[in-house]
Amino acid sequence: MALYSREDDVAIIAVNNPPMNALSHHVRKDLIKFLKVAEADENVTAIVLCGDGRTFPVGADIKEFHKSVSALGPTIIDIVHALEKSSKPTVAAIHGSALGGGLELALGCHYRIAMSTSKVGLPEVKLGILPGAGGTQRLPRVIGLDNAMKWIAYGHHHPAGVGASLGLIDRIVAKGGDIRRSAILFARSMVGKGLGQRRLSNVSVPDASKVEELMAKHLKEVGLRTRGALAPVVCLQVIKSSALLSYKDGLESERQGMMTLLASSESKAQIYSFFSERQVSKWNAPGIANHATAKPMQVRSIAVVGLGTMGRGIAISSLKAGKKTYVVELNSKALAAGVKYIRGYIETMKKRAQISEEQAAAMQSAIIPVSSYNGIANVDLVIEAVFENMKIKKEIFGKLDKVCKPSTILASNTSTLDIDEIASATKRPEKVAGMHFFAPAHIMLLLENIYGRKSSAETIATIMDIGKQMKKITVLVGNCVGFVGNRMYGYYTTESVFILEEAAYPEQVDKVLTDYGFAMGRFQVGDLSGNDIGYKIRTGLGITHKQQPAGTPERKRGVLRYCPLGDFLVEKGRLGLKVGKGWYKYEGSRTPIPDPEVRKIIDEYRTRHHIVPRDISSEEVLQRMLYPLINEGFKILEEGIAANPWDIDMIYQYGYAWPRHTGGPMYYAFTIGLPQVLKVIEEHWKAAGASEPHWQPSTMLTWLVENHGNPDISQWMPLMQKHKSKT
Ligand SMILES: CC(C)(COP(=O)(O)OP(=O)(O)OC[C@H]1O[C@@H](n2cnc3c(N)ncnc32)[C@H](O)[C@@H]1OP(=O)(O)O)[C@@H](O)C(=O)NCCC(=O)NCCSC(=O)CC(=O)CCCCCCCCCCCCC(=O)O
Ligand SMILES: NC(=O)C1=CN([C@@H]2O[C@H](COP(=O)(O)OP(=O)(O)OC[C@H]3O[C@@H](n4cnc5c(N)ncnc54)[C@H](O)[C@@H]3O)[C@@H](O)[C@H]2O)C=CC1
């Protein structure tokens, strides 16, 4: 609802719809009603619009989208026009955030004042839509086309100070000031000043003459940054109309653009992503605990053991979260190198103004270098990040168990190893868990937390809470080889080399993936992270080309199909970007260049095995890359390793850069239709049989299709649970 009050001659209309003052239908009804009351009251000379509680309205009510109520009048644009038409000065008093429809309301007001700490923006593009309440037409009239294109096509939130420098905010109220009081005084001072040019629909776009040039520039940029997404392009096209058409016709163009986007699968996927991102924090470890009941332990200090690629990033994340951070290497040279890196990185963040001087100083003084486990006896949480080797990890956990106080939680950053086996090296398995960060750990937003068979409710709650304190998208999963992310990814890489064998070169496979929306294809990613990583894993499994006794068929490992092309590359020193050659060559830059030498390796291999390369469609490449991964996702759900499909989707969006506008692998399967996905998987399974077990259809997928066709993704788990409880 909204509340109406008077302070002498100024009417105050305050949106009151916790937690975020979203502009739900009942709020919109109140706003129009109270604007009429204020307009009719001759004792009112000015009107202040504000938000109660945490914030100014942050936009339309996203829960209403794709429901008929979202279009029910009064709409946000009706309110924008009522605010603008008012004969009395209307002032938006912004604290917290004014986003989306919230900022559009503020753009309907004649004036805007804001707390210095507040944020403003039109982030609708991140929901796969556009600012549909006049924002595409009104923002360019204030901050110019160039800025409006940037703001709307990327949807960032901007500090109010930036808004003020562009003329969007008329006055800034310093931190600690009273925004409502300031707005009342400001509104009163504007009475009788004339509102003509303050009504944005009356003014023209300042840099309209540059429209074609700006359009070309921004279309090129969004093409690169938000590959394959429709909304940024439609946003730009609609903003363009603000420079070419009348306000009224521009609004019609905005309405049509909105209709196109609302009907797209992209907006549904983005809205799903918005809620999924929040849903994952409501974790559940069946039979052990859930977010509502379990209480985290207070963690004041964290020790990071191993300061290689991962440990350094984890230590920086710990310092950023304000923790006293012990950094451990047994070898003094390695310790010094790790500490130097961490200290240098903090200074770089300071130079780039990503943190303040005080924060940098606090982080520097919270680093405690240690070269023996005894030095970390009293820490609250240890995160181990040493080599991926079970024997070494068990040894370390055994020692930590002896040294650390009984309440210390011991976590491993292993990317594949069995958490229960690691826990078995201690006498405190209830205090052991996995915290799988992604490289680089201080940049990547994903944290995949793993609970073991014996992890306690408190341990799980604590690692989830630490993820939140580190500002990570933290997803809880069960224990299995590779957990969720890497277990699924394994089949993506397996199938990719089979495609090379049969039909395509790396750049052709990668192009299909980047056209789909990935920033990089599978082979470019391989080169970036190092082809030796996969090679080490295959070596651990004893399956690389080099490890086979003479006479072993190159393309078989037991009954399983195998392709050694990745092994050949590593054995020829083509480790990837770090050495300037891998699946591609790199000539002094990070740009991958298709390499005739790689083609030669593939061609010779094909000739040796009498493989005649065939034409392959982009559709087949995409299906073969994505469907085995999706199939494995269903197996993971079936086994209870992930509690919900959106947990998997968030892991993929934030850990593997899966294009957000398709929702993630599981949501993408729903968009395609489960029957169609299953049909393709079954065809491959029939053709390949037991030699390619990743095509064996998941029982859950098969059951869902046979019994429910393509049920809504929110229903997959409830339907399965109901079915299981009956059988
Ligand atoms: C604001 C935030 C940055 C705060 O973050 P944080 O503090 O981290 O809190 P959260 O955990 O994110 O949020 C807490 C809680 O609030 C929920 N929530 C947040 N925002 C919204 C919202 N806008 N709606 C609903 N619920 C919201 C959130 O889910 C949490 O709850 P929980 O899930 O239960 O835990 C951050 O919250 C944030 O970024 N919020 C979103 C901001 C945003 O994206 N705003 C834009 C919204 S879209 C918009 O405004 C669209 C418009 O421009 C208006 C156009 C209206 C068009 C409607 C369709 C009409 C169809 C036209 C038909 C025409 C017919 C014809 O004429 O032909
Ligand atoms: N590199 C990556 O992309 C990712 C790696 N991981 C996992 O993180 C862990 C670490 O991997 P990286 O950082 O890549 O390895 P790394 O080889 O870069 O670093 C390992 C570090 O551990 C140190 N170390 C070894 N034994 C030690 C001991 N007993 N005590 C203290 N320090 C010791 C080494 O000196 C080295 O600095 C592995 O389990 C790996 O699987 C997880 C996610 C991503």
Image (cartoon, rainbow, N blue to C red):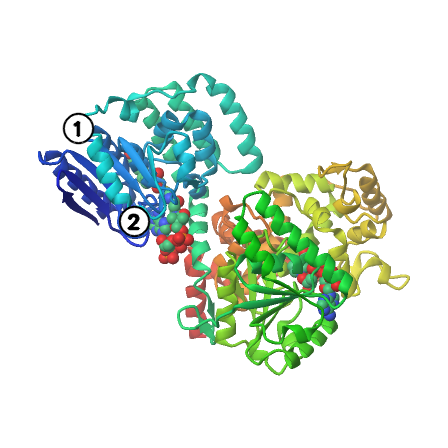
Which residue of the protein is positioned furthest toward the left in this rendering? 42
- The tally of labels here is 2
Q: Residue at x 65, y 63 (%)?
A: 415
Q: Is residue 418 above or below residue 237?
A: below
| Dot placed on the residue nearer the N-terminal end, 1 or 2 | 2
Q: Quick one: quadrant of the C terminus? A: bottom left
Front residue of this view, candidates 108 and 592 = 108
| Amino acid type indicated by mark 2 | Asn
Task: Give the distance between the C-alpha atoms of the residues marked 1 and 2, in whole angstroms.
Answer: 26 Å
The dot on residue 21 is 2
Front residue of this view, candidates 300 and 469 = 300
Q: Residue at x 36, y 46 (%)?
A: 175
- In the rendered image, residue 10, in percent from the top left (x then y), is placed at 16, 39
Q: Which residue is denoted by mark 1 in the rendering?
A: 87
Q: Residue at x 19, y 42 (%)?
A: 12
Front residue of this view, candidates 471 and 318 = 318
- In the rendered image, residue 694, in percent from the top left (x then y), is placed at 65, 59
Which secondary structure lies at badge 2? Answer: loop
| Amino acid type indicated by mark 1 | Ser
